[in-house]
Image: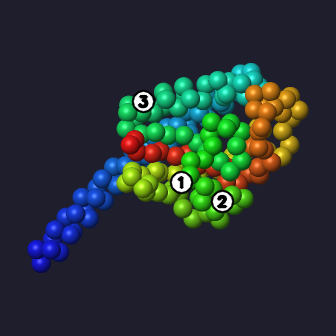
Amino acid sequence: MKYLVLTLLFYSSSYAVDDNFIKDAKELTSELKMSLMKNLSDKMGKDGVAAAVPFCHANVKLIAKKAAKNKVELYEFGRTSHKLRNSNNSPQPWAHDYLKAFAGRKRGEIKKDYIVHKLENGKRVFMEPLYVEAKCLLCHGENVSSNVKDKIQELYPDDKAFGFKLDEFRGFIWIKEKT
């Protein structure tokens, strides 16, 4: 009986820690996505899609850090994909299998809202799938305008992040406990 109580206490305390990490990761992921999309939408509305490409290139890290606020001290975060535009977003080894499993699939085909991956050092990574929205198609779709393609090619000569369809898996936003 004593062993059972200790076991239950251990598991319930570890779930409380997990719940805090997941809660923080969900909030941070939501903030990062909303902030980036708002800033990009504002720039597109004001100056057009072609002007949003260099804006995103120059400001995405700053926008993410502002959205993260005090969480920067606790977590590392980023985006990654199976089809990269920016090589700085190359997948970490822990993301490869997940990217392969999700690549080419649509929102309704993927039953997970998020994945928590445990690293060898015991730290965790929260990964939330990103899906192509209608606005994303302006830069990542099959029919990107020539002036936008030219601007993308100028900034990202090795771009592979095009040809996506609406609701297709685009990659992950990830939150990792700092080691």
Residue 143 in the figure: left or right of residue 22: right
Relative image position of residue 74 (x, y in whole percent): 37, 38
Corner quadrant of residue 118: bottom left
Q: Is there a contact, CB below 8 Å, between mark 1 and mark 2? A: no
The residue carrying pointer 3 sits among few (fewer than 14), some (14 to 19) or many (20 or more) residues within 10 Å by Cα, namely: few
Q: Between 44 and 26, which is closer to the camera in this rendering?
A: 26
Q: Amino acid at mark 3?
A: Lys
Q: Residue sitting at 12 percent across and 78 percent down?
A: 1
Mark 2 — residue?
A: 100
Q: CA distance from mark 1 to mark 3?
A: 26 Å
Is residue 107 in view? no
- Report helix, strand or loop for mark 2: helix
Q: Amino acid at mark 2?
A: Lys
Q: Indicate which disc residue 94 carries.
A: 1
Q: Is there a contact, CB below 8 Å, between mark 1 and mark 3? A: no
Q: Residue sitting at 28 percent across and 58 percent down?
A: 14
- Report helix, strand or loop for mark 1: helix
Residue 61 in the figure: left or right of residue 83: left
Mark 1 or mark 2: which is in front?
Answer: 1
* Comes first in the chain, label 1 or label 2: 1
Q: Residue sitting at 60 percent across and 60 percent down?
A: 97
Q: Amino acid at mark 1?
A: Trp
Mark 3 — residue?
A: 69
